[in-house]
Image: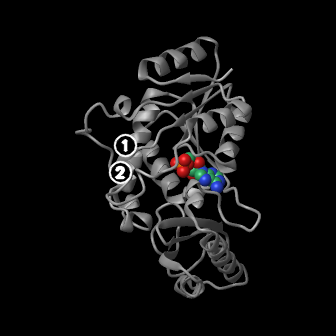
Amino acid sequence: MTAVVRTIPAATEWVQRQRAEGKSIGLVPTMGALHEGHLSLVRRARQTCGRVIASVFINPLQFGPGEDYQRYPRDFDRDLSLLEREQVDAVFHPETAEIYPSPPLISVCAGNLGETLCGASRPGHFNGVTTVVAKLFHIIPADRAFFGQKDAQQLAVIRSMVRDLNFPITIEACPTVREPDGLAMSSRNAYLSPGERSNATILYRALQRAREMIQSGTRDAPNVEAKMREMIQSAPGAELDYARVVDRDTLAGLREIDKEVLVAVAVQFGKTRLIDNMIVAP
Ligand code: AMP
């Protein structure tokens, strides 16, 4: 049986009950519109934790003006039945006002990590992420929380928040789940027209090319970035946001590739912004 928990006191009570039974708790934060990527996190959590709770909450704080907060796909019944099928123990699905009874006066700042890459075109986004994740970690004091490598910058920001603010929780990263043609699964893929959907494989193809270049000896990061930019700019309908080779922890730009790097791209197709990345070792 999957319990549906809608309030903070009910979440506290659920956590206390699991603790009384001596169970470890795994938390999988999501914004719903679940797909195999989310479910892979849930499965990983089930392997390592006595109890698993997923959260389904579309966090208004992390959407900028003009972004897709209003039209973000919402289908809680479908999400719940997928989570039931995965035998998740509980789903935390609060109303917006439960999490933000009033606009927060205090928030968590993601600092420099939140200003580069996606942060440059989505100002404030990562502060919205750190603030809601900090709140979630307090509402549901889990032993482990599971995040996808798909959102590499989000993962770096959350790891840094946990380290810098001493949250007593372990962050686990899970590999990116892809469609058969390589497109990283995303709730936003549903926005793509059939034409955009087939051109959207350019993100994965550019990353693959970057990996080939690095693994066959290219050490010059700007050279790899230029190749990815060229590929993406020649794809129909693709509007490049960035194609970067950066330090995987600090997200700082690099000249020379002399260690494992994060290769990351962001591309706009019409109204849909897609991101993808790979960790590549030279
Ligand atoms: P979201 O609902 O988009 O906020 O994502 C919730 C969690 O699922 C985040 O930790 C994401 O990184 C993760 N996630 C989303 N898509 C994928 C994917 N294709 N593979 C693995 N994890 C994913």
Q: Is residue 280 left or right of residue 244?
A: right
Amino acid type, residue under disc 1 in the picture: Thr
Residue 274 spot, x, y in % from top left? 54, 66
For the point 54% across and 65% down, which residue is it?
275
Q: Secondary structure at mark 2?
A: helix
- Number of residues whose C-alpha sits closer than 10 Å to that of mark 1, classed few (under 14), some (14–19) or many (20 or more): many
Disc 1 to disc 2: CB gap under 8 Å: yes
Where 66 falls versus 240 (above or below)? above
Q: Nearer the viewer, residue 19 or 176?
A: 176
Label 1 vs label 2: CA separation?
6 Å
Q: Residue furthest left?
A: 105
Q: Determine which residue is flagged by label 2.
A: 127
- Confirm or reject: label 1 Cβ below 8 Å from ligand 1: no
As drawn, is 177 to the left or to the right of 110? right
Q: Residue at x 70, y 49 (%)?
A: 36
- Horizontal side, residue 77 vs residue 58: left or right: right
281 is higher (above) or lower (below) than 22: below
Crowd band around label 2 with a 10 angstrom C-alpha radius: few (<14), some (14–19), many (20+): many
Give the SS element for disc 1. Answer: helix
Q: Residue at x 54, y 81 (%)?
A: 256
Q: Is residue 26 visible?
A: yes
Kind of residue at badge 2: Asn
User: x and y percent of residue 211 in the render?
Assistant: 68, 76
Residue 148 appears in the rendering: no
- The quadrant holding residue 235 is bottom right
Q: Label for residue 131?
A: 1
Q: Image quarter for residue 40?
A: top right
Number of residue marks: 2
Q: Quadrant of the N terminus?
A: top right
Q: Residue 57's spot in the image, x, y percent?
A: 47, 39
Query: Quadrant of the image for the C terminus?
Result: bottom right
